[in-house]
Each structure stands twice: as structure tokens, then as C-alpha cells.
Image (tube, coloured by chain):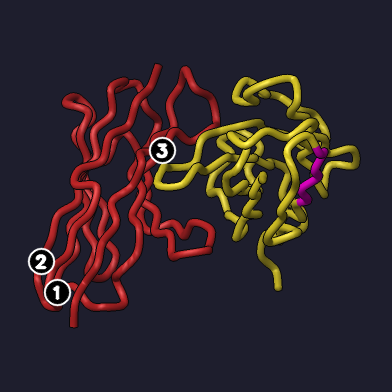
Amino acid sequence: GAGVSQSPRYKVAKRGQDVALRCDPISGHVSLFWYQQALGQGPEFLTYFQNEAQLDKSGLPSDRFFAERPEGSVSTLKIQRTQQEDSAVYLCASSPDRVTGQPQHFGDGTRLSIL
Amino acid sequence: KQEVTQIPAALSVPEGENLVLNCSFTDSAIYNLQWFRQDPGKGLTSLLLIQSSQREQTSGRLNASLDKSSGRSTLYIAASQPGDSATYLCAVRGGRYGNKLVFGAGTILRVKS
């Protein structure tokens, strides 16, 4: 299993709870991206890391969303005080290229359902 | 703001038919355009990547073209098979938008046996 690994695969939470989604990128990949994919839509960019530095967080929809990659490998996307509109698939992608960020290798995603 | 549109939203064809999926984008200042395949419950698999200086790319039964000036790309699938059934997404990466990919909503393809 040398691909991008995401956990959990499925997460159900009650509105108002906090959740944490994990991404294990391919070993050695410096670039890491998070995307949000609503049902029937294409993925939308959330945030981008180069090693441990968060270089772009312009896609995070609110201050309830927070992402980190403290050691430049594993990344965690945290959503506080979840709301129903946060229900979506969250995709993580990694890339070995620090300049272009391509090619991006995607994980299978975490499907988040907020009740 | 870059917007990417895919037509049709869904397509159902009999096995063996040739088909074309369309993608349009509003900002022509892109570095490249990429076509992905997504199977249910799975992540994205890259099919073809066309650099802005290229006109087309081919891989097996797949051919993708790019007309940057008109903001259009097509994905041609020859001799479709039931295993081609999936959602096809196009995405652009552009200078003003850095390294992030901007995706269309996808075309859901069903190939009937």
C-alpha cells in the first residue's frame, strides 16, 4: 500500500460535534492538498501544504475548519462545531513536486455525514 | 474566478459506441488541463494531462484535446466498454490560482452491455 491513505473512511457525527480527518500521504511527497466534494459536484480546493508550511488556505469555508501538518508528513483536517452543510467527501492528495504540485495522487476520501 | 463546466452531466450509451465529453473553462491563463476518472466511493485516477502548449494527448482508447484560446477541452473515448462506466472530471491548473486544481462537476457515464 504505497498510495495516499485516509481515515476514517466513513464518519457520522451529530451537529455541533468536532471531527478530525487524517491523511497519510505517499512517503516523501512534499505537497499535500485537501479538497471537499459535495454530492454530485467536483472536488473544491480547501488548503495546500508544502512540507509543514500551509501555503494556501483560501478555500477553507469558515474559521471552523483547521488543517495542520506539523512534521511535514501526516495531515489532519479538523472541523469544529459541525453543521449539516459540512456533509461531504473530504479528499486528500499528495505530490512529489514542490513547484507544480503535480501529479496529484488522491486518496479514497472520508465520507462525513452530519446528522 | 475560474469556472469549469462539463457537458453533458450524464450520458448513457450502448457498448461499442464512440463518445465525447466536453469541458469548458473561463480563464484561458491555465498551465494545464487534466482529465480524471472517479469510481463510486473512490478517489480520483488521472487519465490524461495536457500542458497549455499542447493540443492533445492520447492513451489507449482515450484522446483528449485542448483549445486554450476558446477555453475548451474534449475527452474522446473510442469503442466504449462497460468498464468505462464512471464519473469523468476535468480540472485546470492556472497561473493565478497557483497549484490547486479547479474541477468541473463531472459527467456520469454509463456504458450498457
For the residue marked with disc 3, what is the amino acid? Phe
Quadrant where the C terminus of chain A lies?
top right
Colour used to depict chain B in the structure image: red
Foreground tag (3 vs 1):
3
The image's mark for residue B79 is 1
> Quadrant of residue B70 in the image?
top left
Quadrant where the N terminus of chain A lies?
bottom right
Residue nearer the viewer, B44 or A86 = A86
For the residue marked with disc 1, what is the amino acid? Ala
Residue A35: where, in percent of width, then height?
Answer: 58, 40
> Quadrant of residue B94 in the image?
top left
Upstream in sequence: badge 1 or badge 2: 2
Residue nearer the viewer, B76 or B89 = B89
Q: Residue drawn at (60%, 43%), measured in percent from left and top?
A: A87
Q: Give the labeled residue for mark 3.
A: B103
All told, the count of numbered labels is: 3
Where disc 1 sits, the SS reads loop
Q: Is residue B41 left or right of residue A86?
A: left
* Location of residue B41 with respect to B91 vertically, above or below: below
> Quadrant of residue A70 in the image?
top right
Which chain is represented by yellow in the image? A
Upstream in sequence: badge 2 or badge 3: 2
The image's mark for residue B18 is 2
For the residue marked with disc 2, what is the amino acid? Asn
